[in-house]
Amino acid sequence: GDSVTQMEGPVTLSEEAFLTINCTYTATGYPSLFWYVQYPGEGLQLLLKATKADDKGSNKGFEATYRKETTSFHLEKGSVQVSDSAVYFCALSDAGAGSYQLTFGKGTKLSVIP
Amino acid sequence: EAGVTQSPTHLIKTRGQQVTLRCSPISGHTSVYWYQQALGLGLQFLLWYDEGEERNRGNFPPRFSGRQFPNYSSELNVNALELEDSALYLCASSGESEGNYGYTFGSGTRLTVV
């Protein structure tokens, strides 16, 4: 079945540091890929998405590129801020295989210190 | 445009009781998804409803059930509550207008079983 593996946290960075959170996936079809963010005490917010190979999703300075050859969708940001402290989830949906629900990774907690 | 709304936001139940959680999707969205986010276990897929029918179900016991109404709102019912059912229950909706690639989450219902 489908699965998502993302790097274990927690990750602690200083403000303005470079961020990478690794995400790889296994899917039977041709999935769409997502990054969601969860701030403390809140639900999930879509951060960015990509629906086909080589697509780059971007939002709020975050980027991720759909790499079919390496089955990866790593999240990057060039300069993190304290306000980026949250839990980040990589996810996929495999609609082509009839699996419309999202399959999530376990989440990576990011803490950014001033 | 109103987002996905869930009610109640918090509740406390006693082991063995039954609970009903509610979700109203974004207007025009016909699919509703339920997820359980238990501490340390990430996001687990529970149920997917579309056009009033259950389309898929995660690996949960039958005491987790639900339904979708003609207005596309949805209920999640949990019978014979157990302590390990304590979790944040998240609802998401999606629709064909986003090509089923847009999943919007509510803020969740925090269930505590004592």
Image: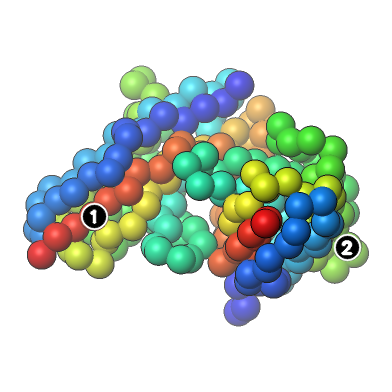
Q: What residue do we see at 56% from left, 66% from top?
A: B107
- Identified at 63% across, 71% down, the residue is B9
User: In this orientation, does residue A50 appear?
Assistant: no
Circle 2 sits in a helix, a strand or a loop, which is it?
Answer: loop
Using the image, tell me which numbered label, if any, was put on residue B109. none
Whether residue B58 is situated above or below residue B108 in the rendered picture: above
Q: Position of residue A36 (x, y in %)?
A: 43, 52
Which numbered disc, 2 or 1, marks the residue closer to the eye? 1
Please say whether residue B5 is visible from this viewpoint: yes
Quadrant of the image for the C terminus of chain A?
bottom left
**Numbered tag placed on residue B69 in the rendering:** 2
Q: Are marks 2 and 1 in contact (CB under 8 Å)?
A: no
Q: Which residue is mark 1?
A: A111
Residue A8 vs residue B87: left or right?
left
SS state under label 1: strand
Number of marks in the rendered image: 2
Across and down, in percent, residue A75 comes to 29, 43
> Tag 1, which chain?
A
Q: As displayed, is residue B46 above or below residue B88? A: above
Give the residue type that dot 2 points to: Phe
Image side of residue B94 versus residue A44, left or right: right
Q: Is residue B57 above or below residue B81?
A: above
Q: Position of residue B55 (x, y in %)?
A: 80, 40
Q: Residues within 10 Å of mark 1 (few under 14, many from 20)?
A: many
Q: Residue at x 19, y 57 (%)?
A: A112
> Disc 2 is attached to a residue of which chain?
B
> Could you give the CA–CA distance between mark 2 and mark 1, rounded to whole angstroms?
41 Å
Toward the viewer: A23 or B102? A23
* Amino acid tagged 1: Ser
Mark 2 Cα shell of 10 Å, populated few (<14), some (14-19), many (≥20) = some
Residue sitting at x 52%, y 39%: B41
Quarter of the image where one finds residue A102: top right
